[in-house]
Image: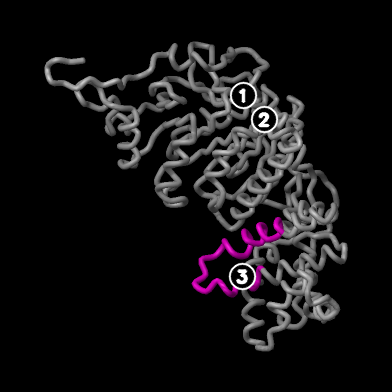
Amino acid sequence: MFNDGLRYQESRMASDVELTSDLDSFYIGEAPHILRGGPVLFRNINQLYVDSSDSHSLILGDTGSMKTLRFVLPLIYTCAKAGESMIVIDPKGELARKMSPFLSKEGYKNVVLNLRTPQKSPDKWNPLERVEKAYSADVDGKHAAVMQLNDLFNEVFFKRTDAKDPYWNESAGQLALGMALLMLALEEDLNMGNLLKWRYEKMGDGTLQKCFESLPKDSDIYQNLAGYMDLTAENTKSCIRSSFDQLVRVFKSSPALTEMLSSTSFDLEKIGETKTAVFLIVPDENTTFHFLATLFISQCYSSLLGVAEVYNGTLPLRVNFILEEFCNLPTFSDLLPMITAARSRNIRLHLVIQSYGQLVEKYGENAAKAVLDNCGNLIYLHSREIQFLRYISDLAGRNEYGRPLLSTSRLQRLSKNETLIFHDRCYPILVEDIPLIFEYPIELGTLIPEKTNEIVSPLSDMDFIDNEWS
C-alpha cells in the first residue's frame, strides 16, 4: 500500500504469458489439426494462440476495422481444422465465397442458403418441415407441432410490424395457424407455397369454407379458423385478409424464394453430430428477408437442444453460431437464455457487431450489458462511441495514480494492427498483428456456390390469384 495518500490500484495490463496460459496454439505456416477451434487472440511470430474454451465471444469494430479478415474468417478456419460445426450469418455472401472450397476439402457438409438471390441458392430450407415431422410422430408430437407453429407464426405475423392495433396481425396469424393445422390433418405437404395456395385459391373457390363446416367445433383447427370464418362483417374479414397479404407479400412476390422454402435439403439435427457448415446469405442493403435469418437461427438452436437431450444434455460435436452483423437482424426474443444455456450444450456464440449502441438500441441497456457479461471474450478493434469507450476504459481500470490504463482518446486511435482483448478473468491486453486470413495456409474461393442445372418449375403467378378478392 502507498503511504503518501495515493490509493493503491490492482489494475494493470496482462503479460503475454498470462494471456496465453490457457490458450491452445498452432503454427500458422503449417496445415495443423487443431483439437478445438476458436478465435485467434494472440500471435508470437508464427505461433498463434486460440481460445478453445466454451466461452462466447463479442467482436466489435466499425466499418473498415478488418474484423472479418482478422477474426471471423480465421475463426471459421480454426473451427474447420478442429472439425466443429458452424452456422454462419453471411452478409453479401463473402464468407461462403471465400471458405466453401476449403471446407469441402476438409470433408464438410456445405450448406448455402442464399436469401440474396434465392433462384441461385444451392440449398433449400422449409421452416415448416420440423412441424410436419413432429405432427406425424405421435400424440406428444402433435402437441409439439402446435407449439412450434405458434412460435413460427409469431415471427412471421406478430413480430414483423409495429402495428398500433395488434388485432389484425393476430387474426391473420390465427388464420394462418388454422390453415396450417388443416393441411396437417389432410396430410398435405406443409410449406409456404401450399399455405399461399390455400389463401389465394382454396379460400376463393369455397374449399376452405367446406372444410371448416365439416370440422368438429371443439377441434383446434375449427377454433383457430373460427376467428375469421365466423365473422359476418365483410369489412372486418377484408381487413384480416389484407393484413395476411401484407405479411406474406415477401413470399408471394418472389416465386424463387417460395421454391427455396418449399423443402429442406439438409438435416438440421445432423449439424450437432457430423461436421457441417451452414452459410445463410442475407442482403446487407435490404432488411426484407432478415426475419427469416432470425427464424432460421432460432429453429437451428431449438433443434440442437433436442439433439443434446438425446446425448445426455451435450452435443457430441460442438456447434459455433458465427453471427456477422448481428445487430442488423431482428431481435431474438430468447437471446439471454440462449447465451446462458448454450455453453452447457456444447454450443458457442460469436457475435460480430459494428457498435455497442446498435446492441443497446436493439435489446435495451440491461440486456446489452448482460450480453457483454456473458461473453468470455470481448474483442475490441475500433469505435468512436464515447459512452462505450468510457465503459471499455473503466473496464480496463486505472493505475495507482487514478489515471485510466486506456483512455478514451487512446481507444479511439488504436492502429489497424492493434486489438484490445478482454479474455475471461485475465487482465486486458493490447495485442498486435493478429494475422489476416491471407496469411493462413488456405486457398480462398472466388465464387459463391450456386445450385446445379436442375430444372425447377417455379410457382407461377396463376398459383396466387385471389379468385374472390383480387
| Magenta stretch contains residue 17 | no
Q: Residue at x 45, y 41 (%)?
A: 370
Eyeballing the image, is 360 above or below 70? below
Q: Would residue 74 be visible to someone looking at this image?
A: no
Residue that mark 2 sits on:
318
Q: Which mark is residue 37?
A: 1
Q: Nearer the viewer, residue 339 or 463?
A: 339
* x then y, percent, for residue 77: 62, 26
Q: Residues within 10 Å of mark 1 (few under 14, many from 20)?
A: many
Q: Secondary structure at mark 3?
A: helix
Q: Nearer the observer, disc 2 or disc 1? A: 2
Prevailing secondary structure class for the magenta stretch in the rendered image: helix
Residue 360 located left or right of residue 286: left
Marks 1 and 3 close (CB-CB < 8 Å): no
Q: Would residue 211 be visible to someone looking at this image?
A: yes
Q: Secondary structure at mark 2?
A: loop
Q: Residue at x 80, y 80 (%)?
A: 209
- Amino acid type, label 1: Gly
- Amino acid type, label 3: Glu
Mark 2 to mark 1 CA distance (whole Å): 9 Å
Q: Which mark is residue 170?
A: 3
Q: Quadrant of the N terminus?
A: top left
Residue 42 located left or right of residue 1: right
Q: Say whether disc 2 or disc 1 marks the residue closer to the N-terminus.
A: 1
Q: Nearer the viewer, residue 189 or 397?
A: 397
Mark 2 to mark 3 CA distance (whole Å): 38 Å
Q: Say whether disc 2 or disc 3 marks the residue closer to the N-terminus.
A: 3
